[in-house]
Image: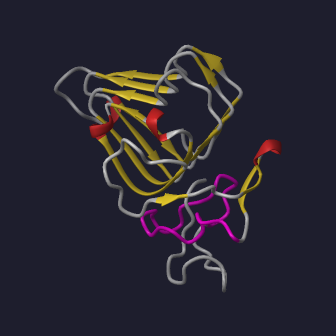
């Protein structure tokens, strides 16, 4: 799911991939790149990857999703990079030891392994209640990563690599999330 919005969906598991045990390929990878995933209801996990399937979340924003005990369930791995996951950390992944994360803003990191570039804070969206997930000028998610490739667009296809003077961290041109 690249540069897309997933909002106000209902179901038992909203995204699911089942990979054969012992193999790993793009066919067994559930990918969210530059996605906004907000305000969804699921009685189970938001996304599930079984067998050798794994979940990759890059440059995405997840907020205010109502799910079962875990946001993600996977047998192989979950990779979170350059993203905002404004959910309860205890619910991010099962099993917690299969989570690889770098340059991520979380509400809470209890129960997760150490994360390089972890920010524990409110992302300070402009107006999430009304669908505006842009970051305020004092957001801790501004200028936090160099992990996204050059030219990686925001969800509205504007370039992310603009370094605004006096905002964020100088020399770190990319914001977390979508």
Residue closer to the observer: 126 or 178: 126
Q: How is the image coloured?
A: secondary structure
Residue 20 magenta-drawn?
no
Which quadrant of the figure has residue 117?
bottom left
> Which residue is painted at 57% across and 65% down in the image?
175
Please tell me which residue is depicted at 55% across the width and 60% down the height of the picture.
176
Q: Nearer the viewer, residue 42 or 157?
A: 42
| Displayed quadrant of residue 94 | top left
**What residue is drawn where x is 83% and y is 44%?**
130
Point out the image quarter for the N terminus. top right
The secondary structure making up most of the magenta span is loop
View extreme (right): residue: 130
Magenta part of the chain: 138-159
Percent coordinates x, y for residue 174 in the rendering: 54, 69
Count of picture labels: 0
Q: Residue at coordinates 45% horizontally, 64% vertically from top-left?
A: 149
Residue 99 drawn at (x, y percent): 33, 42
* x, y percent for residue 161: 57, 72
Instruction: Assess whether residue 140 is covered by the magenta stretch.
Output: yes
* Above or below, 19 relative to 140: above
Q: Position of residue 97 (x, y in %)?
A: 27, 39
Q: Quadrant of residue 73?
A: top left
As displayed, is residue 171 above or below residue 59? Answer: below
Position above or below: 71 against 68: below
Left or right of 156, for residue 25: left
> Farthest left residue?
22
């Amino acid at each position: 799911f690249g540069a897309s919005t997933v909002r106000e969906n209902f179901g038992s598991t909203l995204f699911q991939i089942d990979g054969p045990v012992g193999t790993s390929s793009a066919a067994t990878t559930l990918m969210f790149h530059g996605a906004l995933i907000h305000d969804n209801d699921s009685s189970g996990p938001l996304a599930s990857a079984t067998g050798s399937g794994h979940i990759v979340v890059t440059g995405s924003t997840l907020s205010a999703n109502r799910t079962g005990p875990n946001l993600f369930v996977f047998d192989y791995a979950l990779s979170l990079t350059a993203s905002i996951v404004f959910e309860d950390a205890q619910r991010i992944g099962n099993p917690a030891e299969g989570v690889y994360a770098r340059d991520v803003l979380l509400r809470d990191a209890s129960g997760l392994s150490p994360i390089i570039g972890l920010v524990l804070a409110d992302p300070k969206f402009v107006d999430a209640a009304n669908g505006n997930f842009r970051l305020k000028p004092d957001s801790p998610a501004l200028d936090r990563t160099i992990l996204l490739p050059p030219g990686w667009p925001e969800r509205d296809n504007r370039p992310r690599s603009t370094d605004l003077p006096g905002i964020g961290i100088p020399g770190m041109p990319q914001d977390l999330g979508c």
